[in-house]
Image (cartoon, rainbow, N blue to C red):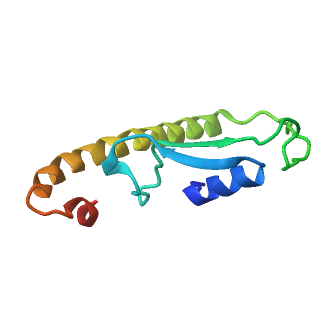
């Protein structure tokens, strides 16, 4: 569900890109923390060596057509679960920021505090 940085590099390389690089976007205290499931600020870039079709050829894209209507109860359940998931992804960065605010003063006295406590 959440690919690693190495997987991104592998995918871009297999697609024929050269000089594949990952650039982190976001605060330094957020980097490398994945136990909460949220990846924040990862940009993958590469250079295509030549014009034309990519080396990695994918099959045709298929769309599945819905055959029957979903019940309204199922739609309400999806709405509730989606709202809870969105709220979780709102809370994680707020939690990480507050944790950073508490650890920053400790880091003045303990050099590796952010590595041990984050």
- The quadrant of the rendering that contains the C terminus is bottom left
Residue 28 on image: x %, y %: 33, 47
Q: Is residue 100 left or right of residue 6?
A: left
Residue at (44, 58) in percent of width and height: 34
| Vertical placement of residue 95 versus 68, above or below | below
Q: Is residue 55 left or right of residue 72?
A: right
Residue 68 on image: x %, y %: 82, 36
Q: In front: 23, or 92?
A: 23
Residue 4 is at least partly visible in this image? no
| Vertical placement of residue 1 versus 116, above or below | above
Residue 21 on image: x %, y %: 58, 48
Residue at (34, 42) in percent of width and height: 27
Single out the residue that lies furthest toward the right: 60
| Vertical placement of residue 117 versus 72, above or below | below
Residue at (17, 54) in percent of width and height: 103
- Which quadrant would residue 91 be assigned to in this image? top left
Residue at (21, 64) in percent of width and height: 112
Residue 14 on image: x %, y %: 76, 54
């Amino acid at each position: 569900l959440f690919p690693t940085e190495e997987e991104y590099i592998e995918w871009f390389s297999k697609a024929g890109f050269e000089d594949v690089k990952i650039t982190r976007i976001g605060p330094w205290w957020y980097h490398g923390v994945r136990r909460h499931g949220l990846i924040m600020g990862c940009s993958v870039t590469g250079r295509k060596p030549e014009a034309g079709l990519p080396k990695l050829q994918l099959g045709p894209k298929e769309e599945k057509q819905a055959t029957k209507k979903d019940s309204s109860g199922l739609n309400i359940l999806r709405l509730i679960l989606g709202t809870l998931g969105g709220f979780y992804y709102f809370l994680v960065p707020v939690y990480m920021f507050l944790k950073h605010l508490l650890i920053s003063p400790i880091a003045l006295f303990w050099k590796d505090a952010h590595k041990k406590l984050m």
